[in-house]
Amino acid sequence: MRTIALFVFLWISAALAGPDGIYYALENRIEKGQIVTIGVPQRVKIGGVGQIEGLLAKATRPPRAAQWIFDQSLKDWVLVDQMGHSFNIGEAKKRYLEAVKAGQDEFVLPVSHTLSNRGAQYYYKQGIRQLLAEATTYFGGSSYERRFNIALGASRLNGAIIAPGETFSFAKVMGEVSERTGFKKAFVISGEQTVEGVGGGMCQVSTTLFRSAYFSGLPIVQRRPHSYQVRYYLPTGLDAAVFLPQLDLKFKNDTPGNILIQSSVGRNSITFRMFGTKDRSVSWSNPVTLSRTPAPPTRYIVSPQLPRQSFQQVDWAAEGATVNVYRTIRFDNGKISKDTLTSTYRPWGAVWLVGEGTRLRSGRIITAATDDAPDNHNYRLPTQTAVRPASNR
């Protein structure tokens, strides 16, 4: 009787300090355009058969959609998903007890894996397999309203997919830009002036997106430079103005697969990345300035909202210029394509709003009758929330 009791005690003790359960957590990755599956071994410490259900419930996970991440070891962007997994509890208990009886240190857990419907395989079949190009521009010094519009506009484009042969329209994908749809008033270029208008900052979004398409080697269907050189968009010659819905930015997907647009907005920067099937390499020149025209003299205009000897700058000087950027596209099939991007900028003068009767350092006194407004102007004091004085729009 004592022998039987001792055997039962030893068996229970072994079960309480039983073998570990092992399984593989799986993920799919797209690296350098190729899809691979990676298994990461996992070990579950099991103190007794009664713990199995709770431990495996904690180890169970749902599938996770694929995300693009920058792999430091590869120095490249890779697409990574996470396969979900769950366990057969009854079978796990059975295997555990068998392993205890056999004196094993570990046993294989019965695991089932599931794929996300937006996993790496989904994107691979779509032809979205690697980074085509990316572009970043900066907007340090922008007002709160302009920053808000940039973030909102970028979010509307994030995740857009362009099918092979499709022409992308910035205006169509962006949709209505108005206060009704959440946009705020910020500085925009309108005619001869920089004034406040709903959606100011959209050109920062369109310029950055344009550059990512241009650097990807896509055909540019419609693009117009700004009226003048804007410091936010240096280097010059690579900007794209929009005034929705009339003035649009368009480019075509002539690659073999779909193209995915992804955006990210930081504290002072916006980035667009394009992912797809890479079938070409692209190079471009630094901007080449063909001609320059000096900026016109500074203008001083009376604002009835300002007291005497008060100044508020509403336009910044920029020289006129004609600028070329040369692009060469080398396709994998041996074809070579070259094009020239030409931008012509008008000279743009600085404008200061001043109070009635303000005396300049030169001794000139500015009045409503003698100011530099050529006719009835629409300049108004800015109502934006300034982060810090901006150098340009």
Image (spheres, rainbow, N blue to C red):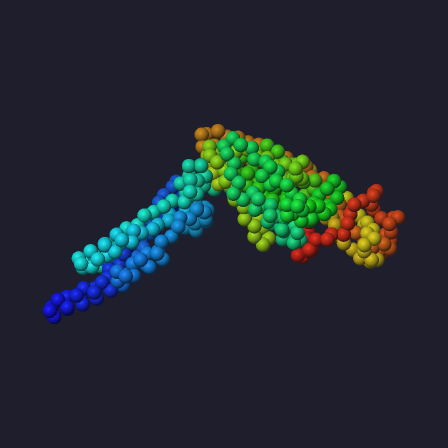
List the single residue furthest toward the front: 1
List the single residue furthest toward the bottom: 2
Could one spot residue 141 in this view of the protein? no
Residue at image location 21% in from the left, 66% down from the top:
13
Q: Is residue 12 above or below residue 63?
A: below
Residue at image location 17% in from the left, 57% down from the top:
102
Q: What x and y, as percent, mark residue 145?
A: 66, 51
Residue at image location 20% in from the left, 59% down from the top:
100
Q: Is residue 377 left or right of residue 7?
A: right
Q: Is residue 45 left or right of residue 6?
A: right
Q: What x and y, as percent, mark residue 6?
A: 15, 68
Q: What x and y, as percent, mark residue 298?
A: 78, 48
Of residues 342 and 276, the one nearer the viewer is 276
Of residues 101 and 42, the one nearer the viewer is 101
Q: What x and y, as percent, mark residue 373?
A: 82, 45
Residue at image location 81% in from the left, 54% down from the top:
305
Q: Is residue 20 left or right of residue 251?
A: left
- In the rendered image, the quadrant that contains the N terminus is bottom left
Q: Is residue 70 above or below residue 214?
A: below
- Count the marks: how many? 0
